Image (cartoon, grey):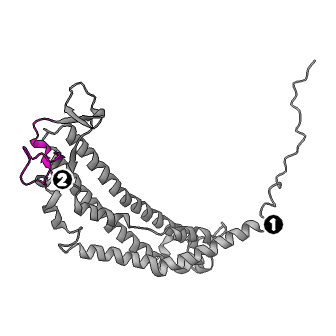
């Protein structure tokens, strides 16, 4: 009669089988090398790059009060931030019949065209009502908002130095019972760095969203040229992007200032969290 009793394993579980993973010192050597590089980089960031970054943001916001700055609020009252200045144009192959005299040579406003053309194999033909929309090649042109372009270039140059996060993470000491106030401070600073990084990421997404929205609005205007809301929609979208950019720069400036201040005022607790906590309680009230 067969036995259904479970057979005992021939390999005994050894709880200490992994105990010697770090014994040869190679991992410790690699970590120490990385830590030294992180310390060098963190010193450069704290002494040079982050203060320079903060001063750059302060200067941008200070200059935003002048009328030659792309961030000047007065820009919203002119140019393509106003719907009447947002015009969709179409290449007219040099034929000036019906062209707007105020438009560049060889162009005419699409909303003045009496008939929309499509192209097949490079040859213009009258619009085919049965032609699927996605096969049409539209000729409408929409100028960029030059002020928005300048703002987007500013946003794309924004950086936040994550070297500080890597350095502090490598300075976190061994987890022990008690005397962990310095570690709490380190974690507090790490959270601030993460928050600032997310703010920077949001700021970097503004140009991508700006260009994508304008492309979509321009494409829709080409498809439905007789609708009257295209120009106001584009002007409103540009104004929203303006405010998002301006507020994003302010948030990034404030985050950088707060981060630098917090690190400066809690410096000993950050670079030497265990020895810096002598006589200090375990509450975050000891910060600042």
Residue located beneath label 1 in the image: 24
- Seen at 27% across and 65% down, the residue is 150
Where disc 1 sits, the SS reads loop
- Seen at 31% across and 49% down, the residue is 212
Report x, y in % for residue 51: 42, 79
**Which residues make up the magenta segment?**
90-115
How many numbered marks are there?
A: 2
Q: Quarter of the image containing the N terminus?
A: top right
Q: Does the rendering let one see residue 265? A: no
Q: Quarter of the image containing the C terminus?
A: bottom left
Residue 36: quadrant of the picture: bottom right
Q: Nearer the viewer, residue 228 or 43?
A: 228
Residue 252: quadrant of the picture: bottom left
Residue located beneath label 2 in the image: 235
Say the numbered circle drawn on residue 64: none
97 sits to left or right of 273: left
Q: Badge 1: few (under 14), some or many (20 or more) residues near its Cα, within 10 Å?
A: few
Q: Nearer the viewer, residue 23 or 121?
A: 121
Going from N to C along the chain, the mark reached first, 1 or 2, is 1
Q: Nearer the viewer, residue 142 or 39?
A: 142
Q: Which SS does the magenta portion mostly show?
A: loop
Asked whether 48 falls inside the magenta stretch, the response is no
Where disc 2 sits, the SS reads helix
Asked whether 109 falls inside the magenta stretch, the response is yes
Choose mark 1 or mark 2, whichever is in front: 2
Report x, y in % for residue 14: 85, 50
Report x, y in % for residue 16: 83, 55
Q: Does the rendering let one see residue 102? A: yes
**Vertical placement of residue 209 versus 134, above or below:** below
- Seen at 30% across and 33% down, the residue is 135
């Amino acid at each position: 009669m067969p036995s259904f009793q479970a057979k005992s394993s021939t390999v005994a579980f050894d709880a200490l089988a992994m105990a010697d993973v770090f014994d040869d010192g190679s991992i410790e050597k690699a970590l120490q090398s990385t830590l030294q590089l992180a310390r060098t980089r963190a010193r450069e960031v704290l002494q040079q790059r982050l203060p320079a970054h903060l001063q750059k943001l302060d200067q941008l916001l200070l200059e935003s009060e002048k009328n030659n700055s792309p961030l000047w609020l007065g820009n919203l009252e002119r140019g393509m931030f106003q719907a009447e200045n947002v015009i969709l144009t179409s290449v007219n192959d040099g034929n000036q019949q019906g062209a707007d005299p105020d438009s560049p040579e060889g162009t005419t406003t699409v909303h003045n065209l009496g008939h929309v053309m499509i192209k097949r194999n490079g040859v213009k033909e009258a619009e085919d009502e049965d032609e699927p929309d996605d096969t049409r090649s539209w000729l409408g042109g929409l100028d960029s908002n030059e002020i928005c372009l300048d703002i987007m270039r500013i946003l794309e140059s924004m950086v936040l130095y994550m070297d500080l996060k890597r350095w502090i993470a490598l300075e976190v000491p061994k987890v022990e019972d008690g005397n962990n106030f310095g570690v709490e401070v380190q974690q507090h600073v790490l959270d601030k760095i993460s928050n600032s990084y997310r703010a920077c990421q949001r700021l970097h997404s503004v140009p991508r969203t700006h260009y994508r929205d304008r492309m979509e609005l321009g494409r829709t205007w080409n498809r439905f040229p007789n609708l009257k809301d295209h120009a106001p929609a584009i002007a409103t979208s540009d104004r929203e992007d303006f405010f998002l950019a301006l507020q994003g720069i302010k948030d990034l400036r404030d985050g950088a200032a707060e981060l630098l201040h917090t690190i400066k005022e809690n410096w000993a607790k950050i670079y030497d969290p265990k020895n810096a906590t002598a006589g200090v309680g375990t509450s975050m009230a000891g910060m600042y």
